[in-house]
Amino acid sequence: MTNAKDNSMILVTGGLGFIGSHTVVALLEKGHQVLIVDDLSNSSVGVLDGIETASGIRPTFIKLNLQNGAAVAEMFQQHRITGIIHFAAYKAVGESVQKPVAYYQNNLGSMLNLLAEVEKAASPIPFIFSSSCTVYGEATKLPITENSPVQPAMSPYGNTKQIGEEILVDTVNAIEGFRVISLRYFNPIGAHPSIAIGELPLGKPQNLVPFITQTAAGLYPKLTVFGNDYPTSDGTNVRDYIHVVDLAEAHVVALERILESKSTEAYEVFNLGTGKGSSVLEVIQSFERVSGQKLTYEIGERRKGDVIAAYADTTKANTVLGWKTKRSLDEAVASAWKWEQKVRNL
């Protein structure tokens, strides 16, 4: 395939992960050349085959730990990188509470090594940051807008995203012409319609939907719902669950916004969600609806670091970025279940 984007090489860190792999497919479909970097700590090299199946193109892949500054520098010397989408990070809220040092070292060290190379570049390299609604902490008002106050983080993971954004703001102020978009997304779920890629966490799932599908597939005897005494409609946590393909498409829109010089500010922030909150029990009901089977679950203790409710006001992304979600909760859950069935040969 000839590249429609003037031979630009877009670096996607963590590109074999759940959101990263779907974004790589979306980039390839728009004609971008992609360089994937991943250390395979929470992914598999086999995802490359899935990306090729979904897109018809096999992107360049380098196994590399971004904490290795010398290796990062060598990569930038060997490849002409004209855009960065930075996903690579540890991402489990609960695990971050148990392993804060590892989270700070990995999530911040990786970004700093990338930005050290951005500083050296002859011309500014557009940077899309995988941020998170966790920066809002326990929001005082719902839905959450981009102007909602950034509250004290509820977990080390959330704090790495807050600090990451602060680092990017400082770097934007220091490098003339440097443009950054931080995408604060809510809860991505689902799988690509080809069912060639999807969410496949290593070890016990930290997120709700893969725990649901793995329980239904027989990997676990039952799902634990962490608390049913929250001040919500049914007592369980409420989140904004967004189809991963919708989310991936937003990253391409954001990158092209900078590449096409449409940014109105050097540093921009957008919430990415559906604008609708769904409780844990509502997601379980969605699964039962689309799969036609009952799910075995129990109510457990609250989990440290979990906020009560979080869902997005998507007005800014809809109007300024020109992006909005197209896919429903049931569609997302159904695709996640199809992916699980494929992976488990059910």
Image (tube, grey):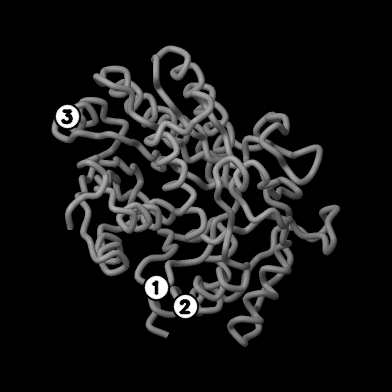
Alpha carbon distance from label 1 to label 2: 7 Å
Residue under pointer 2: 338
Rendered-image quadrant of the N terminus: bottom left
Alpha carbon distance from label 3 to label 2: 40 Å
Mark 1 residue crowding within 10 angstroms, few (<14) / some (14–19) / many (20+) = many
Identify the disc placed on residue 74.
3
Mark 2 residue crowding within 10 angstroms, few (<14) / some (14–19) / many (20+) = many
Counting residues from the N terminus, which is met first, the one under dot 3 or under dot 2? 3
Q: Give the residue type at disc 3.
A: Glu
| SS of the residue under disc 2 | helix
Residue 255 x %, y % = 41, 40
Q: Give the residue type at disc 1.
A: Ile
Residue 154 x %, y % = 66, 37
The part of the image, by quadrant, that contains residue 48 is bottom left
Counting residues from the N terminus, which is met first, the one under dot 1 or under dot 3? 3
Residue under pointer 1: 195
Check whether the beta carbons of the residues at disc 1 and disc 2 lie within 8 A of each other.
Answer: yes
| Front residue of 105 and 255 | 255
Q: Give the residue type at disc 2.
A: Lys
Kindly identify the residue that appears in the image at 53 percent across and 73 percent down: 213
| SS of the residue under disc 3 | helix
Side (left or right) of 240 relative to 98: right
